[in-house]
Each structure stands twice: as structure tokens, then as C-alpha cells.
Image: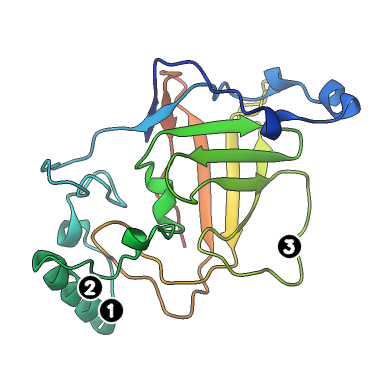
Amino acid sequence: MAYRGAIGASVLVAALLMTVAASQAFDETKYPDLKGQWRRGPNANTTGVLGRVNTFDPTKGWGPAQQAPLTPEYQARFEANLKDQAAGGQGVGLTYTCASPGMPRVINAYGPTEFVVTPGATHILVENIHDSRRIFTDGRDWPQEIMPSLIGYSIGRWIDTDGDGRYDVLEVETRGFRGPRAFDASGIPLHDDNQTIVKERIYVDKNNPNLLHLPHPTQ
């Protein structure tokens, strides 16, 4: 989950430019209010150790406490990664080289995050390295070929779940990955084949407009 900050939204002119016809066709009142800066909510069992608040499941503690359902092979990799980190190493992470942590780790909202909704795409802007995302919402189908990347290629659709004429949920599917990537800063590994498909449902809490839910994505 993420909380809206008190500062105003930063208007990114380049991201908001559109033709006059497109701007006339786009009714922002049909979409949830995502303006402003969003920050990650509190984690369970936070220790104050730098980086350990960046967990995949915020209801559980860091590292082994995440209880990731790993095979014996990948559990051994995870434990070797933890041992390396404990000795002062980087583990499986490559963010120290200024590489993006990739999906689904960028969903963890570890840095200030902003949303820009346009007629054909929703942009999630993260103030960290190359972690910003573009989610196409123009009705396109999956391309025959996708250039693999750490962030992947995202297609989404806005839906009106309660029939009030306003969209309230953004459903997203992301494919087309390359590695190395991990679930979170503890180094929970993803499969070497990178054939991950991440599905998300993003929505504002109905009882608290300053609380944005980024539920644990399935893959």
C-alpha cells in the first residue's frame, strides 16, 4: 500500500502533452484521483536497518520471514545470497550498479511515486534509477515480439467495479522480462527463464482517499 503525500502533484508537461482532440475526449473525472506524491505505508516488523523495509509482502518481516515458496534449488540460492549480504556483499541484487531492480520489485513503492493518467496510458513515475513504468490502456493486444527488459511490457484496463460510471480499479498484466531480478531487497530469487507474468489490481481505498492499494501481484 502507499500513502498520498502532502505536497502537490508535479506536473510533467512532456507526459501530459496530447492533441486537442485527445484532450477533449479525455474526461479525468471518470478516473480515480491519483494526484500528488505517494509513499509506501508501514511494514510489519520493520527493523530500521537500511533497505529492510523494502519487502514484497508488507504484512511479513524481511528475508526468510517472507516465507517465499521456493524450490530446494532456489531456497539454496536465496540462503547463499543472504549469507553474502551478511558478510557485506550485494547478494543477487545489482542496484548498486544503478540498474533497475525490475518487476515485480518496483511495485514495492520504495521511493516517492506519482501517477499520470492519459487517454492511452497510465504512467507510474518512481524517483529511482530507471524504474518508471508505462501501462498501455488503449485496448491494444500483445505484440508478437517484446523486447525483454527489467520492467517488462504492461497492458492494463480501467474497470468500474460498482457501476457508478467512474473507473475505480486498474487491472494490469506485465510480460517480457529479462534478468536478473528479485522479489525484494532481501534477494528472494525469480526463475532463471524470466517467463514471469505479473498481474496487479491498483485502487484507491474507498474509506481513505489518501491510501492506495498495490496488492501483492500474482505471477
Q: Residue 177 in the image: x percent, y percent?
A: 54, 68
What residue type is disc 2 on?
A: Phe
Are circles 1 and 2 on residues that touch, CB within 8 Å? yes
Nearer to the camera, 193 or 5: 5
Residue at numbered disc 2:
78
- Quote the CA–CA distance across marks 1 and 2: 6 Å
Q: Dot 1, crowdedness within 10 Å: few (<14), some or many (≥20)?
A: some
Q: Residue 57 in the image: x percent, y percent?
A: 29, 50
Residue at numbered disc 3:
142
- Residue shown at 78% from the left, 48% from the top: 139
What residue type is disc 1 on?
A: Tyr
Q: Is residue 115 visible?
A: yes
- Quote the CA–CA distance across marks 3 and 1: 30 Å
Direction from residue 61 to residue 162 in the image, left or right:
right
Which of pointers 3 and 1 lies earlier in the amino acid sequence? Answer: 1
- Residue shown at 37% from the left, 46% from the top: 108
Question: With respect to residue 98, does 47 lie above or below?
Answer: above
Q: Residue 89 in the image: x percent, y percent?
A: 17, 68
What residue type is disc 3 on?
A: Trp
